[in-house]
């Protein structure tokens, strides 16, 4: 029975310049003959596909923090969304802190077409993030931002001093109706707060993927670096943190690699262990 390996992308498998090295691509494609390899990422289907186009993929992918599970052929396996009423209520509560989120929503289940809604009122951290999406066809500027019918996640960017009280307020207001993840943004000096369906995280998605593959979670090795990987780490048979992972992630990992994402840490592990 083939072993299963699932890796995060940003700051784990991808280099900091958001590329896949030739070495990592070669190891992945060589090892895909003897193992099931896939990804668990905060990125969308299209963004993940763009990064991974030179890699052999034949297993379900965990996307958008775990809100969506899709095969490489765009077959939807599972989806967890926040409805419009709840999404709009989140925005209204956030407005009390003078901050508005980015909204990643699904326009069409059949085609998996997404919308990336962003407010006209932006802080410095949000301006910086948007630079990376300048030519993204999903982008929709909203003067009075509201959510859509199927919202995959709402994301606030800002300073820790701004987002920590907002996270507490939202959790006090909505409780277990939502999942809240506050993490440092490694591409900048800011932080981000991701709001998800309570079963829209990587941990729940990993369970679904393993059910789909008819395997137990003890049979999978996972790789990661950030807060949204911790739930997945606690479920997997083996959890592996890259050298540049957050201390909170290293603390729950079974293995901490001596190599970072920029040193092809995941690929070097796969090269030796498959």
Image (tube, rainbow, N blue to C red):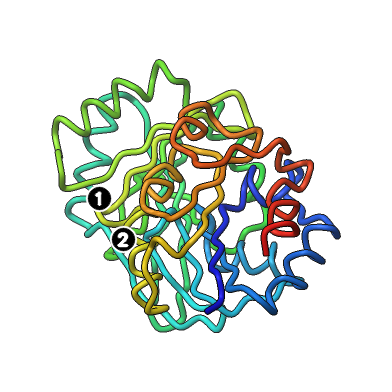
State the image coordinates of residue 224 (x, y, percent, origin top left): 55, 46
State the image coordinates of residue 10 (x, y, percent, origin top left): 62, 47
Residue on which the image places disc 2: 148
> In the depicted view, which residue is nearer to us: 142 or 257?
257
Q: Is residue 32 above or below residue 252?
A: below
State the image coordinates of residue 69 (x, y, percent, origin top left): 42, 70
Q: Callout 2: few (<14), some (14-19), or many (20+) C-alpha neighbours within 10 Å?
A: many
Q: State the mark number for residue 58.
A: none
- In which image quadrant can residue 136 be found? bottom right
Q: Is residue 72 above or below residue 221?
A: below
Q: Earlier in the sequence, mark 1 or mark 2?
A: 1
Q: Residue at x 29, y 63 (%)?
A: 80
Report whether 91 appears left or right of 220.
left
Q: Residue at x 41, y 51 (%)?
A: 232
Number of marks present in the image shown: 2
- In which image quadrant can residue 78 be found? bottom left
Residue on which the image places disc 1: 87
Task: For marks 1 and 2, give the CA distance.
Answer: 8 Å
The outermost residue toward the top is: 161
């Amino acid at each position: 029975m083939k072993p299963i390996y699932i890796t995060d992308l940003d700051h784990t498998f991808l280099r900091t310049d958001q590329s896949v090295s030739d070495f990592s691509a070669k190891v992945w494609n060589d090892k895909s003959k003897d193992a099931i390899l896939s990804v668990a990422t905060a990125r969308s289907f299209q963004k993940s596909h763009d990064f991974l186009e030179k890699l052999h993929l034949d297993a379900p992918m965990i996307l958008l923090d775990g809100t969506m599970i899709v095969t490489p052929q765009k077959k939807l396996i599972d989806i967890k969304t926040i409805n419009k009423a709840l999404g709009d209520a989140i925005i209204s509560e956030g407005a009390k802190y003078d901050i508005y989120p980015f909204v990643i929503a699904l326009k069409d289940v059949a085609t998996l077409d997404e919308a990336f809604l962003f407010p006209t009122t932006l802080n410095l951290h949000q301006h910086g993030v948007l630079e990376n999406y300048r030519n993204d066809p999903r982008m929709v500027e909203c003067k009075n931002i509201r959510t859509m019918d199927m919202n995959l996640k709402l994301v606030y960017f800002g300073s820790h001093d701004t987002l920590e009280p907002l996270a507490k307020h939202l959790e006090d207001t909505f409780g277990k109706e939502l999942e809240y993840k506050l993490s440092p943004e490694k591409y900048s000096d800011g932080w981000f707060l991701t709001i998800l369906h309570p079963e829209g995280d990587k941990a729940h998605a990993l369970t679904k993927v393993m059910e789909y593959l008819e395997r137990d979670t003890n049979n999978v090795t996972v790789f990661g670096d950030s807060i949204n990987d911790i739930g997945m780490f606690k479920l997997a048979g083996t959890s592996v943190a890259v050298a540049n992972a957050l201390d909170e992630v290293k603390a729950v990992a079974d293995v901490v690699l001596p190599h970072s994402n920029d040193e092809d840490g995941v690929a070097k592990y796969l090269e030796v262990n498959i």
